[in-house]
Image: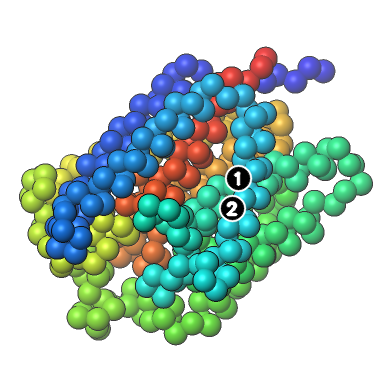
Amino acid sequence: MAVTKFQPTESDISKLSLCFYILLFTGLFQVYSSSAIYAGENFGSPYFFVKKQALFVVLAGSWFWFSAKLSPKFYYFLGGLLFLVSLVALILTHVPGVGVTIGGATRWINLPGGFRLEPGEFYKVGFGFFIYWLLLFKERFENMSVWWPFFLVLIISLALFLKQPDFGSVILITLSTLVVLFLWIKSIKPFLLLGVGAAAGLAYFLTQESYRIERVMTFLNPWKDPQGRGFQTIQSFVAFKKGGFFGEGIGLSQSKFFFLPEAHTDFTLAVFAEELGFVGIFGLISLFMFLTFAILKIAKQQDYDLKRLLTSYYLCFLFFFCFFINVCVNLGLVPTKGLPLPFLSYGGSSLVSIAFLLGYFRSLENEEA
């Protein structure tokens, strides 16, 4: 029996592209709005961060446009290459003299021109293509076991992130992988055992570092240390409260005047909420959800091929958890994680990796019938 291959419709791709470009340019404006004061005070120019981000906006936008010309087979090749290169780069962050430490975390590698590369952002995307290639080898070599290499690479990956440390990325990969395993195993009991095991493992690592325990305690009661660890969360609450229904107005946030740490990175959503209020936040989250459902629909159309289906679902839920967890952090619903908000947070590695992720779904329109 012939296998029917489903291509995304022109409507699916149009929705994906429209959301991508709206968020791309909204993010560039937001980086300027949230970083101008800090950049002017510390780097002598309010355009310090936005000029760098503009370069990455061009790169991300160009790649997304170019992805429409790539075949899915070639994109899987590029994804596999991304996985291998980013894995090597992730390992290099642990090499003394190569990895760059900022705020107690060693997640970056210096690049020419004053730029930094964060390999973990690309590795999280590349891991989805590792799943594809693992299952492809399984098809070629029927006697090959996929479970031990899958879990071996997964454990090594999580260990590398924990060593940096980057507990937020551990959460993202774990949650996205659990979605994949649920579809892969197709049995509730083994999945529940894996879920319980993953929760126990995360709880164990959570208790191994005092700062992680303090973050949990701060999450439970940020007012216990309002001038210390609770300061950031409380200032985020203040920004949301001041924003009200319609916001203070574009560019009129007071939180970015050094009241809110990480105003242009992890907590940029709070600045956005203060300036545009509930209406702006509702529109932004609606746009993210619209984009998520668009790529979820495209992912479901890959059900004729298990390896394509699992890769597509992994990438779809990775994107969803990226913005969902950041929103929850800004609202004080989960402990702070140090995760950027896709498109809106300053950072080239995050933006370009998201463009690569979404470009994959756009490339599926070139599937041969």
Q: Classify 116 as above or below 51.
A: below
Q: Residue furthest front?
A: 112
Picture quarter with the C terminus: top right
- Identity of the amino acid at label 1? Leu
What's the mark number on residue 250? none
Is 65 positioned to the left or the right of 225 in the image? right
Dot 1: within a 10 Å radius of its alpha carbon, few (fewer than 14), some, or many (20 or more) residues? many
Is 16 positioned to the left or the right of 305 in the image? left
Is 165 positioned to the left or the right of 138 in the image? left
x then y, percent, for residue 11: 44, 18
Seen at 60% across and 73% down, the residue is: 200
Dot 2: within a 10 Å radius of its alpha carbon, few (fewer than 14), some, or many (20 or more) residues? many
What's the mark number on residue 82? 1
Observer-nearest of 93 and 284: 93
Observer-nearest of 143 and 219: 143
Seen at 18% across and 42% down, the residue is: 279
For residue 204, say whether it is visible.
yes
Q: Classify 274 as above or below 54.
A: below
Residue, disc 2: 86
x then y, percent, for residue 348: 39, 48
Task: State if disc 2 and disc 1 touch (CB < 8 Å).
Answer: yes
Observer-nearest of 56 and 112: 112
Picture quarter with the N terminus: top right
Seen at 49% across and 26% down, the residue is: 66
Seen at 63% across and 20% down, the residue is: 367
x then y, percent, for residue 304: 70, 28
For residue 244, say whether it is visible.
no
Figure quadrant of residue 234: bottom left
Is 345 positioned to the left or the right of 73 in the image? left
Figure quadrant of residue 57: top left
Observer-nearest of 36 and 99: 99
- Identity of the amino acid at label 2? Ser
